[in-house]
Image (cartoon, grey):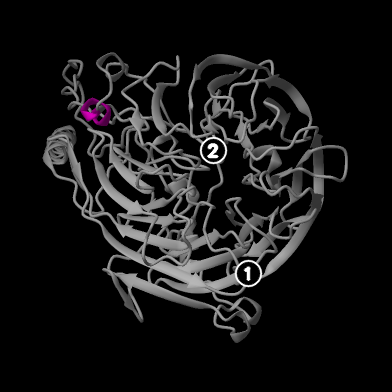
């Protein structure tokens, strides 16, 4: 009887699974709905076990005993002790995060003369509460897509690599390269210029406009790269061959493109230079390249006339909302109202836009060139005057501000400490002071905006090619856990033109420094072996790509790819993809 019940139970579960899979296959994805792309082999329901077989037994010669002992293979049942309840799981860090300003960081401090506005449906409103709250989780929760989907990988901006590396000889080898072009003097891949790299779900790949021979490739990994010739290219990571037709945006793309973290066929693209065509940010369907939404940089709500979008947005899956920073000084939130029907092969958006703008004498040059960072329902960003801001996205109100000396284009990095503290790392360049001066690396308390420590380097001033920090930092993991790593450009102290520095997160003290003859704007990328040994990829303005040992900062190997590397690489397992100002995209393998 026990075996029969077990068989019935398994058959019932199997039938329920079939019903659920069938329901999912025909459903239409409504606003906020998304699926987790396959990251493991699918779970297959086991068939019912065959009926048990028993060997025939001779008739007993004695009466059977009146009592039976339990089978030797089945231990007696264990009675749980009610006095020892199951331990409760630790609270999610977002439930412990309650930012609030202190006197020195309060936007409403009269000394700051800070003013802001909120626009909803084209009207300025005095207050606002979001009906579908934004809620960003941990960095590893941002996406289930296999690959690098956004600038620096996630909502903390803490990784531009996917998967572990298998390092044998600590070598760098060029696997393929393709030529690209320029537009109106803007050539190759610019800053920040990071590609995205993605392994699509098979069912999603089948409905996109990928070439048939690439669509049939089960293990296809696609590189999507927007460059300063205005072209978005789609390439096979294995051989660099096109996977589908390119998109021409007719304006240079300096920043990084982004794909939807839910694995939906959506591509997010900001333009960097006005060439006579409408300039702004677009969301493309990757089914047929239709433009589903356009944010015009020439927004009448802006305080600044600059209309570019170099910074990368984020998408909150829970609320189906994009958070987009603009160089016109506006922070946009766009409720996408995504409708995706995988069976019909269609996707559409019905956007609802809310805007936030601010002004203060602290920001002489408005404009958000950094990518936005998100945690819980808060956004963090820097501007062209060095103002670091925390904004509540569910009310579109400022929480705290901190002025960090000079133009800050480097994207900040959010971190949750082991002791439960919340930190934001940021660094400025040498620009608005019009002279050689100090570039500051700082750790901020992400709750209050207060400066916890700072470290500085004296850097050159160049009005066109700034010194200081334009690269985004590395949060140490594995054998470099506890460090925060920055690449500083155009140093005029120490031994060279640039320095890669690993600082102790707790104290700001130097763990190691590695000096380079050439500076770099490119953001370094950290990769790890399965055992946690770290390596760092560093690219510089002389075309050098360096393989650096993370624990010591020692340069293990260098190759030259003949052109200024302003762009930031993305890494998928052992393969690095990065472009140069000399109009070439390279794939380099770590061996």
Q: Are marks 1 and 2 in contact (CB under 8 Å)?
A: no
Residue 479 at x, y percent in the picture: 69, 38
Q: Is residue 317 at all visible to an observer of this figure? A: no
Q: Which residue carries the number 1 mark?
A: 402
Question: Of label 1 and label 2, which has the lower sequence position?
Answer: 2
Residue 259 at x, y percent in the picture: 37, 40
Q: Which range of residues does the magenta coloring cover? A: 203-208
Q: From the image, state whether disc 1 or disc 2 is nearer to you.
A: 1
Helix, strand or loop status at disc 2: loop
User: Is residue 173 shown above or below 255?
Assistant: above
Query: What residue do we see at 28% from left, 13% from top?
Result: 213
Helix, strand or loop status at disc 1: strand
- Assess whether residue 9 is covered by the magenta stretch: no
Spot the residue most to the bottom. Answer: 110
Query: What residue do we see at 18% from left, 19% from top?
Result: 53
Residue 383 at x, y percent in the picture: 57, 60
The one of 487 and 478 positioned closer to us in this rendering: 487
Quarter of the image with the C terminus is: top right
Q: How many marks?
A: 2
User: Is residue 508 shown above or below 500?
Assistant: below
Neighbour tally class for label 2: few under 14, some 14-19, many 20 plus, Cα within 10 Å: many
Q: Is residue 492 at all visible to an observer of this figure? A: yes
Q: Quadrant of residue 47?
A: top left
User: Is residue 519 shown above or below 585?
Assistant: below
Q: Which residue carries the number 2 mark?
A: 160
Separation (CA) of disc 1 from disc 2: 27 Å
Quarter of the image with the N terminus is: top left
The one of 301 and 39 positioned closer to us in this rendering: 301
Neighbour tally class for label 1: few under 14, some 14-19, many 20 plus, Cα within 10 Å: many
């Amino acid at each position: 009887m026990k075996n029969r019940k077990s068989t019935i139970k398994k058959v019932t579960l199997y039938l329920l699974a079939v019903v659920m899979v069938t329901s999912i296959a025909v459903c239409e994805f409504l606003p906020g709905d998304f699926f987790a792309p396959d990251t493991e082999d699918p779970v297959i329901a086991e068939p019912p076990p065959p009926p048990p077989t028993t060997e025939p037994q001779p008739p007993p010669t004695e009466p059977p005993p009146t009592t039976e002992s339990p089978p030797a293979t089945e231990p007696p049942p264990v009675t749980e002790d009610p006095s020892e309840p199951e331990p409760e799981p630790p609270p999610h860090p977002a439930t412990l995060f309650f930012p609030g300003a202190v006197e020195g960081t309060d936007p409403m401090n009269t000394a700051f003369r800070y003013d802001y506005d909120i626009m909803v449906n084209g009207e300025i409103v005095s207050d606002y509460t979001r009906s579908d709250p934004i809620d960003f989780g941990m960095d590893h929760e941002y996406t289930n897509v296999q690959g690098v989907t956004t600038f620096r990988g996630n909502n903390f901006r803490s990784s531009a690599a996917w998967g572990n590396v298998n390092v044998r000889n600590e070598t760098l080898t060029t696997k393929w390269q393709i030529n690209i072009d320029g537009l109106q003097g803007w050539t190759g891949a610019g800053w920040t210029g990071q590609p995205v790299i993605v392994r699509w779900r098979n069912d999603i790949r089948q409905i996109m406009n990928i070439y048939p021979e690439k669509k049939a490739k089960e293990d296809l990994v696609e590189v999507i790269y927007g460059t300063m010739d205005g072209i978005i290219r789609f390439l096979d990571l294995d051989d660099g061959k096109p996977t589908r037709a390119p998109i021409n945006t007719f304006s240079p793309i300096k920043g990084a493109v982004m794909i939807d973290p839910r694995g939906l066929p959506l591509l997010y693209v900001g333009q960097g230079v006005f060439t006579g065509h409408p300039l702004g940010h677009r969301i493309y369907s990757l089914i047929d390249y239709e433009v589903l939404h356009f944010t015009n940089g020439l927004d009448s709500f802006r305080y600044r006339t600059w209309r570019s979008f170099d910074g990368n947005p984020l998408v909150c899956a829970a609320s189906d909302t994009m958070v987009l920073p603009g160089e016109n000084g506006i922070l946009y939130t766009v409720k996408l109202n995504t409708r995706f029907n995988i069976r019909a092969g269609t996707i559409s958006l019905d956007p609802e836009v809310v805007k936030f703008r601010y002004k203060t004498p602290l920001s002489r040059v408005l404009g958000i060139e950094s990518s936005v960072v998100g945690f819980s329902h808060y956004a963090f960003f820097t501007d062209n005057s060095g103002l670091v801001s925390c904004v509540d996205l569910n009310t579109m109100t400022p929480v705290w501000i901190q002025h960090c000396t000079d133009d800050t284009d480097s994207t900040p990095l959010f971190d949750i400490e082991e002791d439960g503290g919340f930190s934001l790392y940021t660094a400025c360049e040498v620009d608005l002071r019009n002279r050689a001066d100090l570039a500051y690396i700082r750790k901020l308390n992400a709750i209050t905006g207060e400066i916890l420590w700072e470290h500085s380097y004296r850097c050159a001033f160049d009005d066109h090619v700034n010194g200081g920090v334009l690269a985004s930092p590395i949060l140490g993991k594995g054998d470099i856990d506890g460090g925060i790593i920055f690449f500083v450009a155009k140093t005029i102290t120490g031994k060279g033109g640039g320095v890669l520095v690993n600082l102790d997160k707790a104290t700001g003290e130097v763990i190691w420094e590695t000096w380079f003859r050439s500076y770099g704007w490119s953001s370094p990328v950290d990769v790890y072996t399965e055992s946690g040994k770290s390596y760092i990829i560093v690219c510089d303005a002389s075309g050098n790509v360096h393989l650096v040992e993370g624990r010591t900062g020692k340069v293990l190997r260098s190759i030259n790819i003949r052109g200024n590397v302003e762009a930031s690489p993305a890494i998928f397992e052992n393969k690095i993809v990065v472009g140069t100002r000399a109009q070439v995209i390279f794939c380099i393998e770590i061996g």
